[in-house]
Image (cartoon, rainbow, N blue to C red):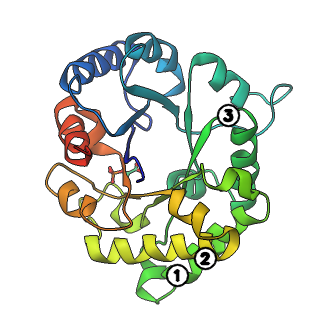
Amino acid sequence: MRIPVIAGNWKMNKTVVESIALVKELKDFIREIKGVDIVVCSPFTSLWVVKEIINGTSIHLGAQNMYWETKGAFTGEISPLMLKDVGCEYVILGHSERREHFKETSEEVVKKTKAAFSFNLIPIVCIGENFEERESGKTKSIIEQEVKALFLEIDSTLAGRIIIAYEPIWAIGTGKSANSQEANLINKFIRELFSSEYGNKVAEQIRILYGGSVNPKNIEELMNESDIDGALVGGASLYALTFSQIVKAAEIL
Ligand code: PEP
């Protein structure tokens, strides 16, 4: 049985004061919820204060990015050591906004994934096709390329701990969610790729999320699919009520 994951990606939103308000409210809403790994990925500037508030609750802390080196002359970067130090357990890597705006490559995402594992951080690796790629029937080949890049560097002892977030880029922040059956087919395909590389046991362990305009209305349908193990949530994670409703729908009772 895979424990579902609901991860909130706040992106570049929320000052420290706003982060405190949001996470305090969320803490109240999710008090009774069990059987789902809840992750809040605040901006770097709020990680410390969010951690202070979620201590002793079932909310886990995640970051939205990191560099692969541990320390040194890399102005402006944040290392896995620093994330660990502030209390992070998860880190989002290779989000499409980073791939698009900051030209992050799959090779860099792999380096970051390796570095995350070496600090015992759970990487949430984002993959997905853009609109043109989807329209020209390239979805599976894009997914395959992005997943296989990970296989080169991640050995079988770690592979089962990775979290993959399938996020069709055209569905992110657009209000246009992928059809749950279509998303499930891609998640299944990702699991098959892991199975052929690491075997069925590892493939059955990894949690594969869906991301792209997830909201309290579509989460139930998504969670009913066999290979969707949770969601990476952007916009709807900025409101404690909607995020907690999504978490609630993913709960294993
Ligand atoms: C995301 O940021 O990864 C995301 C899926 O955003 P949204 O839920 O707003 O589409």
Amino acid type, mark 2: Glu
Quadrant of image for the C terminus: top left
Residue 58: x %, y % from top left: 36, 25
Foreground: disc 3 or disc 2:
3
Pointers 3 and 1 in contact (CB under 8 A)? no
147 relative to 243 in the view: left or right? right
Query: Which one is nearer the viewer's eye here, 121 or 43?
Result: 121
Q: Is residue 212 above or below residue 47?
A: below
For image coordinates 20% across by 19% down, the residue present is 28
Secondary structure under the numbered disc 1 in the rendered image: helix
Pointers 2 and 1 in contact (CB under 8 A)? yes
Which residue position holds label 1? 140
Distance (Cα) linking label 3 and label 1: 30 Å
Amino acid type, mark 3: Asn
Which residue position holds label 2? 144
- Local crowd at mark 3 within 10 Å, few (<14), some, or many (≥20)? some
For image coordinates 51% across by 63% down, the residue present is 204
The disc placed on residue 120 is: 3
